[in-house]
Amino acid sequence: MTTTIRTQVGILGAGPAGLLLAHLLQKAGIDSVVIDGKSRDEIEGTVKAGIVESPAARVLAESGVSDRIYREGAKHDGIEFHVDGNAHRFDFQDLVQKSVYLYPQHEVLTDLIAARIRDGVPPLFGHLAESVQDAETTRPRIVGTTTEGEAFEISADVVVGADGSGSIARIPVCGSQRNGHYREYPFAWYGVLAEAPPSSDELIYSRSEQGFVLISTRDKNVQRMYFQCDPLLDASTVSDAEIWDTLQAGVSGTTLKQGPIIRKDVLRFRSFVAHELRKGRVFLMGDAAHTVPPTGAKGMNLAFSDVLWLNQALRSFFATGSEALMDAYPENALQRIWKAQHFSYWMTSMLHIAPDATEFDKLRSLGELASVTGSRSAQAYLAENYVGLDYGVGDWD
Ligand code: DHB
């Protein structure tokens, strides 16, 4: 027995991209069904990055998801770069009159899921998609099984793959899951959550001979910190003492406040852009369409750009039957995707030392950092990208 659900838009993935799209479509009277193989607890408990750009915060608040970000998020008006122990502050308010919000992604997810429940259309958790069929017909389908072992099928006018970096929707769209532009990096981040008070009011991105260190925060009791490591390192093999030594060596001018480490993980670095973002009636967005390395925390912020372009295209399609904006979706979305790819790559390469770096490479990147910190125009360029470029597409009411 297969349960068939009929909807206008079938969305794979109850992450930030899929949930925001469902919310915006509903505001235009378009029905959607969001499915995810994971449970609600697993989704809300996943540790992800903590920075929400100012345009992303506006979308969440102004579209009626929640304004909790403005009430409970911490507004950050700048960041620090520490280069071999010398601190430089980027003053976002002075440079571009904008800020970012320290508001962990699981809080955004909590708000988005609460909004779906509030609006009477909860996501279907525990619904694992196995394939997307009939992309090039007017009735594409998502086929899968629930965690209880029941077969289901979602029959839609449009299917959206917002199913993350292991996306199965990529198969009908790109021909395979790996079909895209790739860049691998010879390093990763070792990430920790520690129960300790904050060591700094603002985020510190530090580059020294020891490698990269990032001091971030979650709230007044829990801190998020990262240091550069080998991508093959097993997180469980590093002792708490070694972690504190490495972090402290990276930020010599700041004394870190220590406490119990409650989580350790290794984050792989990769840049990826799928070769195609659309095949017939199936579209990709968010991590299903692209991956950025974590430096600068662009992942979710970039996903919202895809959401806004696709929301505009689908609203137009369901209102008029015209596919013009659906046709334009890949080109529109890719403009920001490549800008964010560049920014994430640039922040990464400027602040890390590759294991095979030559003396020339190291000195050149110090020259680059001196150029950026020493020029108001360059600082403004970094700030403009860090706080978030305007999305350039509205339709969120
Ligand atoms: C965080 C992660 C990032 O990648 C970043 O650039 C800044 C902050 C974080 O998890 O807090």
Image (cartoon, rainbow, N blue to C red):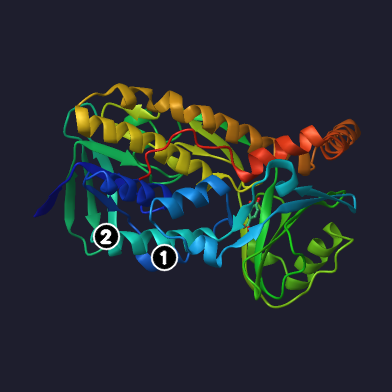
Q: Residue at x 64, y 62 (%)?
A: 235
Assess disc 1: are there few (<14), some (14-19) or many (≥20) residues with their C-alpha within 10 Å of its C-alpha: few
Question: Viewer-proximal residue, 123 or 364?
Answer: 123
Q: Is residue 6 above or below residue 120?
A: above
Going by the numbered disc 1, the residue's amino acid type is Glu
Q: CA distance from mark 1 to mark 2?
A: 22 Å
Q: Would residue 174 be visible to someone looking at this image?
A: yes
Position of residue 287 in the picture relative to residue 216 (left or right)? left
Q: Residue at x 65, y 36 (%)?
A: 343
| Ligand 1 visible in quadrant | bottom right
Dividing the image into 4 quarters, which one contains the N terminus?
bottom left
Dividing the image into 4 quarters, which one contains the C terminus?
top left
Location of residue 144 in the rendering, given as x and y in whole percent from the top left corner: 23, 50
Residue to which mark 1 is pinned: 42
Q: Tell me which label, 1 or 2, sits earlier in the chain.
A: 1
Question: Viewer-proximal residue, 390 or 238?
Answer: 390
- Disc 1 or disc 2, which is closer to the eye? 2
Residue 103, picture quadrant = bottom right
Residue to which mark 2 is pinned: 119
Q: Residue at x 37, y 39 (%)?
A: 395
Location of residue 331 in the rendering, given as x and y in whole percent from the top left corner: 44, 23
Location of residue 348 in the rendering, given as x and y in whole percent from the top left corner: 70, 41
Provide the secondary structure element on which disc 1 rests. helix
Question: Viewer-proximal residue, 204 or 141?
Answer: 204
